[in-house]
Amino acid sequence: MAVPAQADALIDNVNGITLDEDGDVIHFTGLLMTTDGRITKLLGRKDKRPEKLDWRTDMHGKVMLPGFVDAHGHIMDLGFRSMELDLSDTHSLAEAQAKIAAYAEANPERTWILGGGWDQEKWGLGRFPTAAELDAVAGDRPVALTRIDSHAVWVNSAALKAAGITPATKAPPGGRIENGILTDAARLMIMQAVPQPLARERDLAFIQAQQMLLSKGITATADMRTTLDDWLVYRRVADKNLLRIRILSYADSIQTANRAAGGSPSPWLYDDKLKMGGVKLFADGALGSRGACLKAPYADAPKQSGQCLLTDAQLKNLMSRAAMDGFQVAVHAIGDKANAEALDAIEAVSDTYKGDRRWRIEHAQIVDPADLPRFGKGSIIASMQPIHALSDRTMAEARLGPGRLAGAYAWHSMLENKVPLAFGSDYPNDDFNPFHGWVAGFTRADGAGQPFGGWQPQERITREEAWRAYTMGGAYAAFAEDRIGRLAPGLWADFIIVDADPLLATASDLWNMQVEQTWVGGKMMWKRQ
Ligand SMILES: [Zn+2]
């Protein structure tokens, strides 16, 4: 067989598995690439290897897969959270209080105690924790601890004082202040009082996050709320040649998009490792804190139906402004009403902004079954997080009641309606191990098979469909399918080496799959020590 002239590096003797353009599985045993990391050819067992090569390496039969693309994450939040107090492993309020007290004692130099990951549902508390319960363990130092879903913050009296919040203070529209808990729009009142991190602290947080993501086999990730400061971190790190993962950036506002990228999406920068291509908008909050905007009241709070954060006119206006400058629009919508409003707005503006726009709805968690076909009709991308179905199921049942789960976390229905599906994890708000999300996608259960038979198992998709959503789906959702998402000639050699064949593994083995190496652009960027 003729060998292309530019093929000058060979990774040989692999058990290579990827999907092709149509999502069908293909196998190969060697990967030829240019020395700058673009794939030129996949070789089968019988294909002749070129004789003249700049370098070659032998993988001794190990399994090679395309790198995962996480379609929805928050890089800087992940980095900062890894350096702050982490309460995600606490199972009771008392356990959390003990951990807070120990952290305060171990970190006397910190003027604020920051952290997050708590979940009163997991604690079995049946209510939110209070300021007094923090005062009891943290004393006079301000403390601000973000809930697992990032939609609420728990503070003590010192933090309230530092932020100038008194019992007379009114919460801003779209937020609530209650006994030391500030939700959604009210969170900002605290966050503005927290001292800003230094540039070098930001860079350090980024490097931490990058390592964590690469170690789980994620070679590209959407960054779903890039601030101007975040963008400067990515540029600084890349200028020092330390950017090792691909970032598909969605600005936190139209202002940021214009200030960071200019009046149109940025080009692909640093060998396709960074691009600001879109803007993230918010239609509502989260289900856990009852901020998700529902068509009917919450089953467990009959006087509340959540908050739609933007009026129909505001949403359309923001979408138009983004689309006018060529930015892609990603709308956060969790509740069925927020999803319906996002669909209304997209349908209204797509008459004006035609062409391949790839409107995205982030989470699309609770969708009225009547609205599902609208995703397909508009080719609107459903950017969903399979792991949420496991972490949220008890909470979702409580919030919605049994009668309203038909369009909840409805991946199968999305595919039935020909909706482009992109999977991610919404890290650091949930477990970002893509093997966990993959298993959740086709079993609706965890690695231990819980709950037995899967939660709402009619919404399972196949193993290959879930894999596709976590690789090609994420690439397509960011206009990057001509660069990443699978292994094929012309695309970047972004791949991982793992310890077993994921298509033959049991769900439990797939859940526990270990990444041994992570390569981005033909370079090894992470290796298990
Ligand atoms: Zn998010």
Image (spheres, helix red, strand yellow):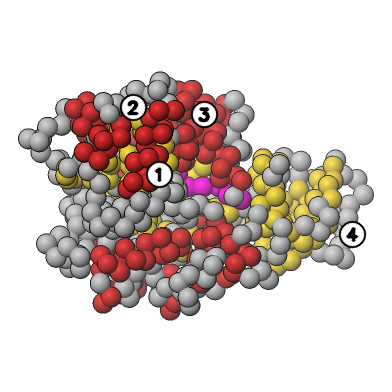
Of the residues tagged 1 and 3, which is closer to the observer? Answer: 1
The front one of 491 and 462 is 462
User: What residue sits 76% from the left and 41% below the top?
Assistant: 35
Of the residues tagged 3 and 4, which is closer to the observer? Answer: 3
Q: Which residue is mark 4?
A: 48
Q: Amino acid at mark 3?
A: Leu
Q: Amino acid at mark 4?
A: Lys
Dot placed on the residue nearer the N-terminal end, 2 or 1: 1
Does the Cβ of the disc 4 residue fall within 8 Å of ligand 1? no
Q: Is residue 218 magenta?
A: yes
Of the residues tagged 4 and 1, which is closer to the observer? Answer: 1
CB under 8 Å between discs 4 and 1? no
Q: Which residue is mark 1?
A: 87
Q: Which residue is mark 3?
A: 204
**What's the distance in space between the residues labelled 2 and 1, CA to CA?**
16 Å
Q: Position of residue 513 (x, y in %)?
A: 64, 58
User: What residue sits 35% from the left and 51% below the top?
Assistant: 92
* Magenta stretch bounds: 217-226
The secondary structure type at the circle numbered 1 is loop
Q: Position of residue 90 (x, y in %)?
A: 40, 49
